[in-house]
Amino acid sequence: MLKISEIMKDSLVDKEVETRGWIYRWRESGKIIFIVLRDSTDIIQVIISADNVPPEDFKAAKESGIESSVIIKGIVRKDSRAPNGYEILAKNFKIVGPSINFPISKDKSDEFLLDNRHLWLRSREMTATLKIRSTVFESLHEFFKNESYYEVQAPMFVSSAVEGGSTLFEVPYFGKKAYLTQSSQFYLETFIFTLENVYTIAPSFRAEKSRTRRHLTEFWHCEAEAAWLSNEDMMAFEEKMIYYVIQSVLENNRKELLFLKRDVEKLESIKLPFKRMEYADVIKLGQNVGLDIDYGTDLGADEEHEITKNFDGPTFIVHFPKEIKAFYHRPDPQNPALVLNHDLLAPEGYGEIIGGGERIYDLNELLRRIEEEHLNAEEYYWYIDLRKYGSVPHSGFGLGIDRFIWWIAGLEHIKYAVPYPRNVRRLIP
Ligand code: 4AD
Ligand code: MG
């Protein structure tokens, strides 16, 4: 039994092979049935002629519907008219699982395809995207391993906010209130006192009502935290990571990128180091391209889209005013109105994919910021404790993996980058 990709080789031409998969396309022309068969590896044309297969096999092929699962035996031939240049002249054709009236046909609406995501996953678009996703997750793990980071796991049920209360998902918890985690950052900070360099890849949840091209309510978050590292050190680490993953995708998924009509040159031309821009300069740049923003405006999806449309590579924005960033960011001792943080913006209009920076490690400074933001210090007792017992300078970041894939694959909307996207209107399938 061979996979389809293993069959399409000159050494197998005129040889008999057996393969299995699902019917992707079906057409009949006189006494011949043309099928395009797919499996996880590729597609291949299969020719079932009444002259070459037993009558019951021909009948089965004639009655087989799109997405039936089948086992085929036949002779490999080269034919430039076939989709990948090869085809199988069938000698046997057996149906394993019939499929009658597969609901997805051409020109179905986006909503229909989302309602039928469990079936649409079989499309070549989703196959390509899922393969790219797999490479991205795999190469992230690989990168952290190469850099000697430990993988850790944080809880998903939590009792306090990391990124502000307005996007917390509340969950009833045995008569108490729990939340779904917005970020594993605070837990990662607890691990650095044991392991120094840690990361986790886990879902994060945000009760995000805004309907943009880049917001999900559940997303995959790659977060890292490292003792002793500065904001600068962390940015150098991140750009190396982003570059590493992109090289892996270019190496392993060129076929998928081309299928998705990604302009691969845009990815190939990315160079290290990435550009750094001061927040204040980004605001000026935004004003110059006609955006209605002032110093102190937090950049949203639309603003970042306009700003990064003409960027030719990923760009770090540094030194945000502390008022528009979460309380844990360390104010710059040279200019305490600004924090030692960074956002990494993807080019081509995609915008923020990473948020990170240096954390406050001084106890009193943290208590002051908690008070300034009117937060309840008791809720954060364990986070505050870290500053009482052997505190160290440290930095970290969070990469939105779905956004990263959205950009790498050059997709129009983040929902196309995720197998089962969740947003304010979608909870099925
Ligand atoms: O910028 P954010 O909110 O930063 C944090 O959560 C930090 N605590 C991370 C850290 O330092 N450990 O989120 C980080 C990234 C964003 O840059 C974005 O890529 C992604 O997470 N993200 C989302 N992705 C999809 N849908 C949403 N609603 C997202 N919210 C954030
Ligand atoms: Mg952010």
Image: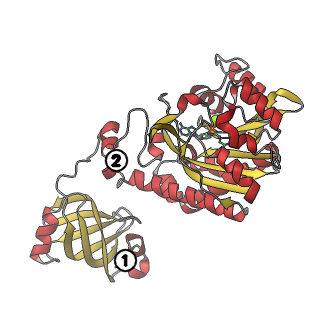
Image spot of residue 155 (x, y percent): 56, 50
Image quarter (top left, top right, bottom left or bottom right) of the C terminus: top left
Instruction: Tell me the kind of residue under disc 1.
Output: Leu
Q: Is residue 123 left or right of residue 166?
A: left
Element on which disc 2 rests: helix
Q: Which mark is residue 117?
A: 2
Image spot of residue 428 (x, y percent): 34, 42
Instruction: Tell me the kind of residue under disc 2.
Output: Arg
Q: Which residue is mark 1?
A: 2
Q: Is residue 46 above or below residue 197?
A: below
Q: Crowding at label 1, few (<14), some or many (≥20) Cα neighbours within 10 Å?
A: few
How many discs mark residues in the rendered view?
2
Please tell me which residue lies in front, 150 or 65.
150
Image spot of residue 80 (x, y percent): 37, 66
Element on which disc 1 rests: loop
Q: Is residue 326 visible?
A: no
Q: Is residue 153 left or right of residue 98?
A: right
Q: Is residue 287 above or below residue 369?
A: above
The quadrant of the rendered image in which ligand 1 is seen is top right
Please tell me which residue lies in front, 411 or 234.
234
Image spot of residue 400 (x, y percent): 58, 44
Image quarter (top left, top right, bottom left or bottom right) of the N terminus: bottom left
Q: Nearer the viewer, mark 1 or mark 2?
A: 2
Residue at the image point whose x is 62% and y is 54% from the top: 200
